[in-house]
Image (cartoon, rainbow, N blue to C red):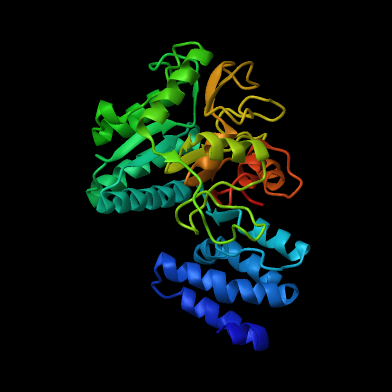
Amino acid sequence: MIDACHETPEIAWQAINEILKRNLTDEQIGLLAAGPLETLISQHGAAFIDRVEQEARINSRFSYLLAGVWRCGMPSEIWARVQKAKKFEIISFANADELASRVASLWLDEIESANRAGKTHCVALSGGRITQKFFASTVEQAKARNISFERVHFFWADERCVSPTNSESNFKMANELLFAPLKISDSQIHRIRGEDSSEIAAKLAEAELRRIIPIASPSPRRGEGRGEEANFSSNPLTPALSPLWQGERENLQSHGLPSLDLIFLGMGEDGHVASLFPGKTEGTNPKEICCAVKNSPKPPPNRISLSYTAIAAANQVWVLASGTGKENALRESLSSSGKTPLTRVVQSRLHTKIFSDISR
C-alpha cells in the first residue's frame, strides 16, 4: 500500500477511501492515517490537496481520519491546507427543525456509547433559540429510545447573572425543557449561580468543574521528537487542543484542565460564542476555566462564561449555528483571516463540528 502511494497515487487514493468505508477500529484508522494517507499527501500533495479538502468537508469519517495525519516532510503550503481542512466540519440542514433533530440523535448516540462503556458523560449546555428545539427533540427521542441519563453530568458554557427562575436564565430553559421531562436528578445538574456576582459565580463554577470532571493532561503521541506539536489526547484521532495559542497549551501542560466530553455552543450575529464577544478580553486568560464577563454588548450585561482555554480542552465541541442574519458572521468565522470568537474556538482545536441551517 505504501508503494502504491509513491508509484500509483490514484489507485492508493481510491483504496484509502474504500478501506475507510469498512468498520475499522480506532487503531486501524490510526494506521491508515499515519501510513498510506500521510504518505500520499507528503508525496503528491499538490495533486491531491483539493480532493483532501473536499472529502474532509463532506465526509465526517475522512475528517476524523485526517486528524491523524502529520506533516512528515510536506511543503508548508500543503501542510497549512491540511491543518485547515481538519479543523472543522460543517453539517448543513434545510431548517432548524432538521438541525435540532439530527443533533439530538447524535448526542443520544454519545450518551449511549458512554453508558455501554460504563463512563460518565460530562456536557456543557448553551442557551439560544435553537436550543429550545434541540431540547424538545432530545426529550422526544430519548423517551422513544429509552436512553438512560444516569451517567450524564450537566454544566453550562455560559450563564447570565440572573436568578435561576428568571426568563433570561439558561438554567431555567434547560430545567423546564430538558431536566424536568427526563426527570434528571439534582445531583447531576451543576448550574452556574447567576444570582451571585459574576466573579463569585465564575470561581464556584470552576471549582465544580474541577470537582467532577477528569483532568486533561498531555500524553505522548506519534510525532513527538520530530519537531511536531503534541495532541493532548490519549486517542491520536480524538479532537483536542491545537497549539495555536501558546499560553493555552502551556496551561494545559503545566496545570491540567477539566476536559468536558462535549460542549454545545451557539453563534451570534457577531460571531460570539458562549458569552465571549468580539473585541473583549474576557476568557483570554490562559489560566482561567471560567470567567466573569462585564458590560456584555447583549443584555443582561453581567455574565459567566467558559474560557477559550476550557473550550479548547474539551473532547468535542458542537456549534449549533442557526437563524437569520448570521451569514456574514459564519463566513468570517470560518475564513483563515477571521477575527470572531468562533474563529478563535475553531483555530484553537484540531476539530470542531458545526451544525448549520445558514445559507453560505
The quadrant of the picture occupied by the N terminus is bottom right
Q: Position of residue 150 (x, y in %)?
A: 24, 39
| 319 up-or-down from 301: above or below | below
Q: Which image quarter: residue 23?
A: bottom left
Left or right: 35 as drawn, with respect to 235: right
Q: Nearer the viewer, residue 259 or 331?
A: 259
Q: Which image quarter: residue 63?
A: bottom right
Q: Position of residue 163 (x, y in %)?
A: 42, 13
Q: Report the residue that reaches farthest toward the front.
A: 225
Q: Which image quarter: residue 277?
A: top right
| 174 up-or-down from 118: above or below | above
Left or right: 93 as drawn, with respect to 118: right
The residue at 52%/33% (across/down) is: 255
Q: Position of residue 222 (x, y in %)?
A: 55, 61
The number of callouts visible is 0
| 170 up-or-down from 15: above or below | above
The residue at 64%/59% (across/down) is: 85
Left or right: 265 as drawn, with respect to 26: right
Left or right: 132 as drawn, with respect to 229: left
Q: Position of residue 319 (x, y in %)?
A: 53, 44
The residue at 26%/49% (across/down) is: 115
Q: Nearer the viewer, residue 71 or 8?
A: 71
